[in-house]
Image (cartoon, rainbow, N blue to C red):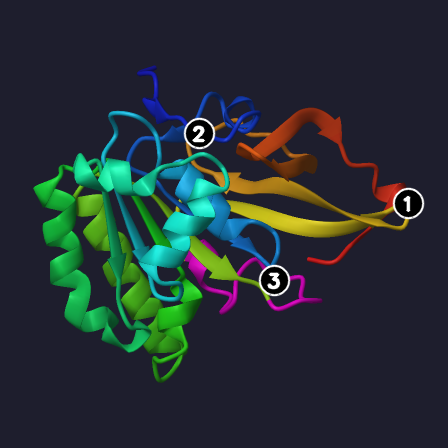
């Protein structure tokens, strides 16, 4: 059987939970509520040396992202100056108008990685569930056509047990990683689980992770004991 080529997530401790990384060219949904580190995860994924990336934001301004990244020692401007990173900011309601520009930027730097932050932002401007699904499929087709390994961010409504904002993103994409908040010993902590990852014998457990001075790091051997925690999705 031919081995699957994988790209590192650039998240310490996470690759070993997915057989060494995300299969090349696959699209992964990253979902969670506010405060779980979705944007940090996306930026960390985008800062792998010698692997050109495109980061598309529909929410935060590029200057804000550069400042946030600097807290973790990531110099986004330096990567941009070397054309190893394209930071693109669009209004959410422009999604249909900017797909061509997104593709041009991917091709101009031969990007191997793409982050879209977030699907929830542009989908809220679409008229109905059919249009949301159709647009997500169009975005996914664009990324697959260009061979990009991609992270698509989705918000989850607090208290919901859903995997995504609209309940359809997980069916279109190849993998799903869910970031969660939990209460343990009267303290909020964070845990993630890999809900699915095609072509991958991935972990089935919940693993605690931390956001520290170098970004996100997962504790792969630290399984969460359900009897002692309460999840806040």
- Which circle's residue, 3 or 2, is located before the other in the chain? 2
| Contact (Cβ within 8 Å) of mark 3 with mark 2 | no
Residue 203's quadrant in the figure? top right
Task: List the residue tagged with mark 2.
Answer: 10
Q: Secondary structure at mark 2?
A: loop
Q: Is residue 25 visible?
A: yes
Q: Position of residue 28 (x, y in %)?
A: 42, 45
Name the disc covering residue 162, or none: 3
Q: Circle 3: is it few (<14), some (14-19), or many (20+) Cα within 10 Å?
A: some
Closer to the camera in the image, 226 or 133: 226
Q: Is residue 113 visible?
A: no
Magenta stretch bounds: 157-171
Q: CA distance from mark 1 to mark 2?
A: 30 Å
Whether residue 119 sits left or right of residue 166 in the image: it is: left
Q: Count every numbered label the image shows and give the total.
A: 3
Whether residue 15 sits left or right of residue 210 in the image: it is: left
Residue 50's quadrant in the figure? top left
**Image depth: mark 3 or mark 1 in front:** 1
Residue 100's quadrant in the figure? bottom left
Q: Is residue 170 magenta?
A: yes
Q: CA distance from mark 3 to mark 1?
A: 25 Å
Q: Is residue 217 magenta?
A: no
Whether residue 70 sits left or right of residue 203 in the image: it is: left
| Contact (Cβ within 8 Å) of mark 3 with mark 1 | no
């Amino acid at each position: 059987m031919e081995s699957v080529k994988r790209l590192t997530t650039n998240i310490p401790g996470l690759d070993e939970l997915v057989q060494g990384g995300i299969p090349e060219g696959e699209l992964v949904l990253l979902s969670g509520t506010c405060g779980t580190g979705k944007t940090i995860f996306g930026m960390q994924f985008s800062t792998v040396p010698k692997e050109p990336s495109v980061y598309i934001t529909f929410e935060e301004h590029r200057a804000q992202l550069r400042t946030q990244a600097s807290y973790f020692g990531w110099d986004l401007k330096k990567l941009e100056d070397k054309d190893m990173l394209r930071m693109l900011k669009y209004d959410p309601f422009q999604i249909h108008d900017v797909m061509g520009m997104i593709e041009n930027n991917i091709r101009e730097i031969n990007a191997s990685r793409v982050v879209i932050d977030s699907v929830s932002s542009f989908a809220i401007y679409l008229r109905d569930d059919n249009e949301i699904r159709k647009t997500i499929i169009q975005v996914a087709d664009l990324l697959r056509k260009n061979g990009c390994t991609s992270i698509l961010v989705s918000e989850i409504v607090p208290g919901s047990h859903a995997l995504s904002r609209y309940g359809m993103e997980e069916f279109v994409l190849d993998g799903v990683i869910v970031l969660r908040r939990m209460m343990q010993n009267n303290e909020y902590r964070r845990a993630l689980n890999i809900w699915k990852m095609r072509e991958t014998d991935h972990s089935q457990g919940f693993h605690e992770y931390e956001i520290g001075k170098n970004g996100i790091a997962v504790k792969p051997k630290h399984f969460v004991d359900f009897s002692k925690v309460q999840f806040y999705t």
